[in-house]
Amino acid sequence: MSDLKQTLKEQIIEQLNLEDLTPADIQDDAPLFGEGLGLDSIDALEFIVLLEQNYGIKIADPSEGKDIFQSVNSLAEYIEKNNKT
Amino acid sequence: MYYIHTISSISNQDSFRNENVYASLREFDAENDVVAPDYKEFIPRNSLRRLSPILRMGLTCAMECKNVIGKDFDSIVVGTALGCLKDTEKFLNTFITSTSDFLSPTAFIQSTHNTIGGQISLGLNNHAYNMTHTQNNLSFEVSLIDAILCINDGKKNVLVGAAEEKIDFLELVQPNLISADYPLASGASFFAISGEQQNSKVAIQAVDTNFRSKNVEKEILAFLTKEKIDLKEIDLLLTSGTELNSTTFSNKNINYMNFTGLHFSTSAFATHIAHDFLNNNDAKFALVVNDLCKGNLGLTLLKKG
């Protein structure tokens, strides 16, 4: 699980062009949107692409996104349960 | 008259916040694309991460113009021939190579030509008239004409400019795109103009475009006659490498392509050079001649006073 979180942080930084951040700057339980990393709705779309491209996961119900994309922890848990690669 | 109140350019030259670009012109530096300021001073970090070079340059120049004049613009007019090439290339590459059902939205959203104007609007929180013109090498001149029409229509504060960015792929297709042989470059130049003189010393007197140009020399002379100016009154002629009879056109002249490098909106930077020449010298008229693409002629006449 910790390897997955580290990989996820690297993928988030690359996909969202967070050029000033390193994986160590992203806390596992910190909110990704709003006050956390300050991500926005376009980033939410980028997350959907990231999950599909890297883990073969398609989010069928967009309303699920709010819970899934809450933090690196929630993302990692969702991927563990649904990974199709 | 359409008075220039401030200009902001990012180019291969040291032009940003330079009061006299004309005096500091140096040979084109092929090792560097542009001399850029620290964009973080102008654009919030969270927005900056998504922006390609053309968007960074355009938005920064626009913000600088707004900061200098201290007023909101009531029109924003942008010229760009090739638009946001980096994002277009990224989007198309992903489109071709991706095996997934979804594509990254950012590159797609930012691949359109009018993204520059859109980002300026968002960055300045400005909901005024916003227009993008794409007319090959005359994109800037057509934008200037639109800006002039806005002023004639009662607008008080117009932002007009042009921006281009180079990508490596352009080097492959350059011979098919254009016959001019200069090193490829990027750049952005934006102008705050209005119909009121205030503290401005230099104005745009007239702009003309001809998309069926056949005889550049005759067309320049006809343009000047229309403006009631004798060719001898032109203190500086800035050309895009135009071949002119040196006996007839004996004016002081420079080929601005030697300083800008090659992109399709170099005449915007030439207009900046012309402005600074008039602003800092005992001179009255400067003419920018843009026939970078044969058959497309743009003429921009600047006047001091």
Image (cartoon, grey):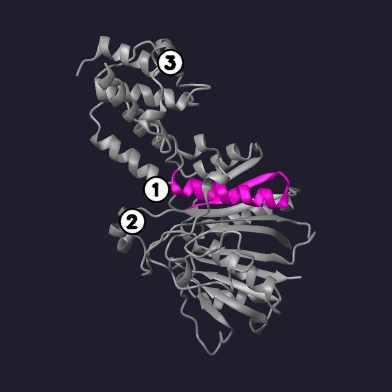
Q: How far apart are the alpha carbons under marks 2 and 3?
A: 41 Å
3 vs 1, front mark: 3
- Mark 2 near mark 1, Cβ–Cβ under 8 Å? yes
The quadrant holding residue B186 is bottom left
Which residue occupies the extreme front position in the image? A24
Task: Tally the marks.
Answer: 3
Is A42 situated left or right of A52 in this image? right
| Location of the C terminus of chain B (image quadrant) | bottom right
Q: What residue is shown with label 3?
A: A70
Q: Are marks 3 and 1 on the same chain?
A: no
Which residue occupies the extreme left position in the image? A85
Q: Nearer the viewer, residue B51 or B221?
A: B51
Q: What residue is shown with label 1?
A: B85
- Identify the element where label 3 is drawn: loop
The quadrant holding residue A7 is top left
Is A78 situated left or right of B304 in this image? left
Q: What residue is shown with label 2?
A: B170
Q: Residue at x 40, y 61 (%)?
A: B32
Region rendered in magenta: B52-80
